[in-house]
Amino acid sequence: MAASDSDDVNLAYDDTADDDYFYLDDTDDDLHPPQASDSLDDDQLQGSDSRNGDDDDLLQSSDRHDEGDHDCDDNDDGDENALEEDDQDSPISGQNFSVLTEADIRHRIKDNIAEVSSVLSISKNEASSLLLHYNWSVNNIFDSWFADEKAAREKAGLFLEPLIESPDHGSSICVICFEDYPCDGTKSTSCGHRYCNDCWSSYIKTAIADGPQSLLLTCPHPSCRAAVGEDMVGLFASEKEKNKYFSYIVMSYIESKKMIKWCPGPGCENAIDFVAGSENLDVSCLCSHSFCWNCTQDAHRPVDCETVTKWMSKNSSESGNVNYILAFTKPCPKCKRPIEKNMGCSHMTCRAPCLYEFCWLCLGDWNNHGTCNRFKGNPEEEKREKAKQYVIKYTHYFERWATNQNSMKKGAADLQKVQTEQIEVLSRIQAQPLAQISFVTEAWKQIIECRRVLAWTYAYGFYLPEECEAKRNLFEYLQGQAESGLERLHDCAEKELQSYLKDKISVEGFIEFRKKLTLLTRVTRNYFDNLVAALQNGLSDVNSGSSSVSKKRKSNWAAAAVNAAPALDTNINDNSATAPAAAASAMEPWACAYCSYENQSSATNCAMCGRGSWTCDVCTYANPRTSATCAMCTEAPEP
Amino acid sequence: MIDFARVQKELQECSREKDSSGIRVSPKSDNLARLTGIIPGPLGTPYEGGSFEIDITFADGYPFEPPKMKFVTKVWHPNISSQSGAICLDILKDQWSPALTLKTALLSVQALLSAPEPDDPQDAVVAQQYLREYQTFVGTARYWTESFAKASSLGVEEKVQRLVEMGFPDGLVRSTLEVVGGDENLALEKLLSS
């Protein structure tokens, strides 16, 4: 990048290494006065070769839209506009967001600066000072500027006239280091207070080292509010400091936008621009980190943010201890808090505020305690059992939540492996173009997403009230089906794939495999989407009844599932009248097609292996006995 | 890097103007990184007549980082710690500018003595007293000035001694002296009339 006239020195915003800041030509080492810098700045926006430095460029620069490949018209509030060019390939979520890389952000900032600069006919430097002082709201700048330009200028520390006469010849004393300098050894910003170049340099470096408040740096003169902006930073800071200053600008931009947040993924420098009003709060970054837009915790559909917080704090306070607690403690019979016996006698007193006194051995009330050496069926035992159940229940849900979380992480690692190695191997061995193999990565992305959802359904389950038995049953049924469906997909993607990685079996065989995996992926996606929707609306289908005419297929699906749920077996006869194959013999014992277990007539799923009684020909889903049509793909079974 | 050339020039400036400003700055040793400043208590305040010693150390980036200042002389003031002498003054923190100097900073400290800001206190006890019992505050501040910031402040014990010898109890003598700002005659009048 030489200091030549090459046309697009500053257009290299994709090149994060060189183009550190937003408008300055960093190859230009001249200490050009601010007013002259205008001509340098705007040429870049033309994207043309017309770098002749005429100041009129400023006014012509409005056709900047043809430059670059990003949408440039997202001025201040344009952050709702998704960048349609940024094609998202997130597996599940719709286009409720877009990912902004550092280059995208920088580009938006440049656009903001260019817009303000061209509309107000001011330099880029002044425009960026205004934006920093007006929290990046272009509209606010325009409103204030056109209402009272002087006040707006004052707020941003941009003076039209120098506050003091500064001699343009002879020498002057720098009031920081008290040395005498010839005029060209000193510099001032718009206010006219001159300091020597060395002192400027130290001043700006110290400010940048101090942090982002350096974005609002003012003239060193104690009462002067003149802005020290990008032009001065460009002149006096080192590359490293300019980078830092640049990152402050990016930070300030992102933090000023309500609908943009940094991706919390480790080491990730992208930001997520969320589409206002989207229902789906889960977003996933290019770094493959998925998180909830609202709480920035890891993505947690279908559970809401509150439950997640509750669950996570419960985990952090208990997870490491659960096993220990189960093994070595007894729950207080009154408040259920786990108690460890650390003193010799059996007289226990629970901690405040409970303060319940009881016998360690029989857990009976100490006040009425005589002896408890005699064996008898103990009513207190029941209480104790209940408390213990609570802890066991938590352990149950936690273990499954954690296992699925781990599976998800493992899945992400596997996906990495698939993308970097297996895809190519597969393409070579099976002699298929890469495009024909993308179904494998799709499957893995689906697996990861499903593991995540499945993990959170356990948090959901833990907080689902015990009283709503119908809901519980439906929930558990849906969850069970989801789990086995996912296992099938996972198994297929993990194990069956292996054989195709080794050698070429047959083209037909591979096509068959592709068909199967693609179908499984789709079916599992549908199932999980429906599951999420059903859980998010609080399993309301249970109450609304199975006959309600539903708006979407979703509800049909849920209704079918309700019918299939074991708790609602009363419907069996009505349904089975229309259900072919399996239902024809609804009242007779039946043998499981998978494990050959002889089931009771009333069982809808195999009591042994948990699978349904008939397999859908289209999607291979194992349906419960009572379903007339496939609960997954709604296809009717072949007669 | 401390700009010692500038420190040297500042010292020269201070010594040139010490008669008009009353502010004196001198190096603690031959090392210019630590200085001692002395400011006179402003007229018309409880600090009048005292001369206050301030310890000045330079941070590494001086003059781009503010100098560190604290009172060595004990002083009773809402924005100065009565324990440590730490000063709560914006220009010694985030409002510092390299265009300020030791002289201007010390003048600001002096101005702070004249115009306390009890709403932004360094010493909560003093600030409370300033807001609630202003007269007591003035008395205490004057007593502290008498006791700690005056060359003659050694005389306090002698005053106590003399009044105790007149038959007043030690504790009462001290509190009365404190209330009247250390003036022996006023204290005696007060003791006699009570």
Image (cartoon, rainbow, N blue to C red):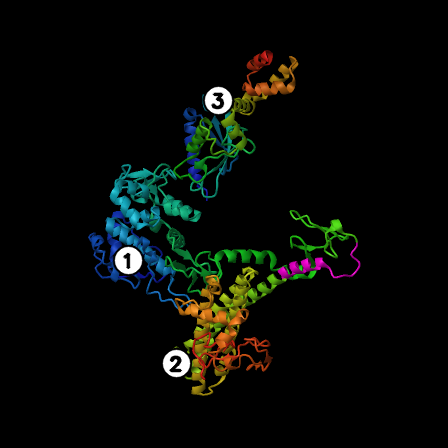
Side (left or right) of B183 relative to A548: right
What amino acid type should be assigned to the residue bearing mark 1?
Asp
Q: Is residue A386 magenta?
A: yes
In the rendering, at what x and y percent does residue A520 appear? Answer: 46, 76
First of labels 2, 1 by sequence position: 1
In this orientation, which residue lies closer to the viewer: B73 or A173? B73
The residue that disc 3 covers is: B48
Which stretch did the figure color magenta? Answer: A371-391
* Disc 3 residue crowd, few under 14, some 14–19, many 20+, Cα 10 Å: some
Cα gap from disc 3 to disc 2, whole angstroms: 92 Å
**Picture layout, residue A392 above or below residue B64:** below
In this orientation, which residue lies closer to the viewer: B67 or A161? A161
Q: Secondary structure at mark 1?
A: loop
* Disc 1 residue crowd, few under 14, some 14–19, many 20+, Cα 10 Å: some
Res A147 quadrant in image: top left
In the rendering, at what x and y percent does residue A17 appear? Answer: 38, 60
In the rendering, at what x and y percent does residue B51 appear? Answer: 50, 25
Whether residue A441 is visible, yes or no, is no
Cα gap from disc 2 to disc 1, whole angstroms: 39 Å
The residue that disc 2 covers is: A433
